[in-house]
Amino acid sequence: MTLNADEVARTARELRANVDLSGLTRDEVAADLGLATARHATALDARGPSDPVDVWQLRDHLDGAGTT
C-alpha cells in the first residue's frame, strides 16, 4: 500500500514526535536499530528512498519504548 502525500507527512510528524516522547536521542534510536544516521533520518521522513521496513521497525521500536 502506498501512502498519499498527506499520510506521509502525518506519519513523519508522528514518528518525530514519538522519538521526542521516548526520551531517546535520534542517534540512540538509530544505533538501537542498527541504522546509519542518514538512513534513520530518511525513515523519520517516511518518504523515499527509504525502505518501508525501516519505517515500520522505527515505529515498532518507538512503540516498545512506551510512546503509544
Image (tube, rainbow, N blue to C red):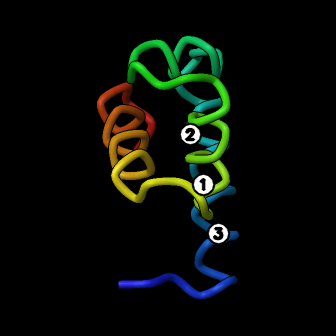
| Viewer-side residue, 65 vs 1 | 1
Q: Secondary structure at mark 2?
A: helix
Mark 1 in CB contact with mark 3 (< 8 angstroms): yes
Residue bearing mark 2: 18
Residue bearing mark 1: 14
Q: Position of residue 43 (x, y in %)?
A: 56, 47
Residue at point 61%, 72% (across, down): 8
Q: Position of residue 19 (x, y in %)?
A: 59, 32
Distance between the Cα atoms at labels 2 and 3?
12 Å
Give left or right: position of 24 versus 5. left
Mark 2 in CB contact with mark 1 (< 8 angstroms): yes
Q: Secondary structure at mark 3?
A: helix
Give the quadrant of residue 11.
Answer: bottom right
Tell me the quarter of the image containing the N terminus: bottom left
Q: Position of residue 55 (x, y in %)?
A: 44, 51
Residue at point 51%, 21% (across, down): 29
Distance between the Cα atoms at labels 1 and 3?
6 Å
Give left or right: position of 52 versus 64. right
Residue at point 48%, 13% (across, down): 31
- Is 10 drawn above or below residue 14 in the view shown? below
Of the residues shown, which amino acid type is indicated by label 1?
A: Glu
- Is 18 drawn above or below residue 33 in the view shown? below
Label 1: how many residues lie within 10 Å, few (<14), some (14-19) or many (20+)?
Answer: some
Give the quadrant of residue 66.
Answer: top left
Residue bearing mark 3: 10
- Is 39 drawn above or below residue 11 in the view shown? above
